Image (cartoon, rainbow, N blue to C red):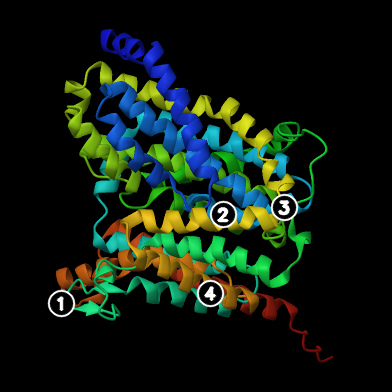
Amino acid sequence: MDAFLQGLALVFNFQTLLVIAGAAIFGVFVGAVPGLTATMAVALLVPITFYMDPTPAIAAIVTTSAMAIFAGDIPGTYLNIPGTPASAAYVGESHQLARQGRARETLGTNLVCSMFGGLFGTLVLVFVSPSLAEVALKFSSFEYFWLALLGLSCSIFISIGSKTKAFLSLLVGLLLSTVGLDMMSGAPRFTFGIPDLMAGVNFIPVMIGMFALNELMMFYGSRNEGRNVPAVHKDEVFSSVPKHLKRYWRNLLRGSSTGTLIGALPGAGADIAAWISYAMGKSRSKNREAYGTGHIEGIVDASSANNSGISGAWVPALVFGIPGDSITAIVIGVLYMKGMNPGPTIFMDGGGLVYALFTVFFIANLIMLPIGYIAIRSAKVFILTPRKILMPIILCFCIVGAFAINNAVTDVWIMLIIGLVAFILARNDFPMAPAILGLVLGGTLENNFMSSMLKSNGDLLSFFSRPISAGLGVMVILIWFLPLFIRLYRRYRGAPQSPRTP
């Protein structure tokens, strides 16, 4: 009890609360600017945390990441350009709703679901983190292979339109993921003698090119200001939220729990949690045909998952020192620097600092509501500013965002080339989402497959030798063959009955 009170005292003081407020505003700004990501925001904070006490330093990182993930929905809704990778899963739904004049309603639902998902993930972090971390540690290369394959399969099935085009788009992403050094031989692949490509193609420039640059080319290619979102005449931010939550409360709980579980798996992160939650929501929905046309159900699933995934990623980071995503990879270094060594002993040696960390999570998600509301009310700048002025500004931020990842001009060229390819693909109705997910999970798929083959001496049946691996494998195979079974069943039910002989 003394440690708990000590943790509250560390948080509820003027310095820490001021840091939380400033970090929330900074997170909103970074998340709302296309080309800048939550990971970049946290990385920019690290030098500043050198001069802070442990509690304000961790509070700044937690608040910034939570706010940036939500704020990424703002440009996604108004401009069809996700501010952060975690918003890419449902950017189409948000923008379609905005074009129907429901932008603030959509963002209000996003905000409340993000806050609920973050609080849900925090509760899990506080009460169930040791158990979840133990489950995550039981995942070997066999389980991660099936999990990556499950994510890639979901990217095809959630796509709107031709599944063949979605599959081809996925192959583009997988091709990009092969660039770099081969993990087995160490030989460079598809680097064309460029040293910057030895480490592979970075995800951020590709995402900027596929979404932001593609949207810019679409705008200048059509010369049509009619692509703007209709102006909002009514301040309806939260008025429809109770109705949506009452109708889709199961989606809210499922998205939050799915996001927390996926986030607790090392290397997964909020963006993969959002994709998988969106796919699960669509597969279980009674109104699947509405997905992709502006359906609030998909937003409830995915927006609650990405923020709960942020909290879930702290589970392996805190308990075992294993980063759950790129943000917690940075955080682990900050924790060591502040004398909080991640691991099972952190709950015994950390004292009030651990309880202060838990309290910061609650405050960061609760402050999201007022700061997010102000951000939504201020977001009309995306409507009032003519696109011929707004688009060049966004292009500048995109170039800065692509360059700032590795301080390399190569990433800028990657963004430009991918943007041109994406523009050609989009004009021919190829979905972008499978390509993005192919790049994200391609390396995970290949590395875990090769590791598993080495462990098993090339025995493919070893992928079904472990209980969790076998369960995931059966699930993936069923997903592959489910459309065939449904088609055969419908053909059987719709076949004319042969006339009976008297």
Of labels 3 and 1, the one closer to you: 3
Q: Residues within 10 Å of mark 1 (few under 14, many from 20)?
A: few
Q: Residues within 10 Å of mark 2 (few under 14, many from 20)?
A: some
Q: In this figure, which residue is indicated by the disc labeled 4?
A: 420
Check whether the beta carbons of the residues at disc 3 and disc 4 lie within 8 A of each other: no
Q: Which residue is drawn at 46% across and 45% down?
A: 259
Q: What element carries label 2?
A: helix
Q: Where is residue 166 in the image (x, y as percent from the top left)?
A: 55, 74
Of labels 2 and 4, the one closer to you: 2
For the residues marked 2 and 4, what is the alpha-carbon distance in whole angstroms?
Answer: 17 Å
Which amino acid type is shown beneath numbered disc 4?
A: Leu
Viewer-side residue, 425 vs 472: 425
Viewer-side residue, 129 vs 482: 129
Of labels 1 and 4, the one closer to you: 4
Check whether the beta carbons of the residues at disc 3 and disc 1 lie within 8 A of each other: no
Check whether the beta carbons of the residues at disc 2 and disc 4 lie within 8 A of each other: no
Q: In this figure, which residue is indicated by the disc labeled 3?
A: 386
Q: In this figure, which residue is indicated by the disc labeled 2?
A: 394
Which amino acid type is shown beneath numbered disc 3?
A: Pro
Q: Position of residue 460 (x, y in %)?
A: 26, 76
Q: In this view, does 128 lie above or below 177?
A: above
Viewer-side residue, 220 vs 457: 220
Check whether the beta carbons of the residues at disc 1 and disc 4 lie within 8 A of each other: no
Q: Residue furthest bottom?
A: 501
Quadrant placement of the N terminus: top left
For the residues marked 1 and 4, what is the alpha-carbon distance in whole angstroms?
Answer: 32 Å
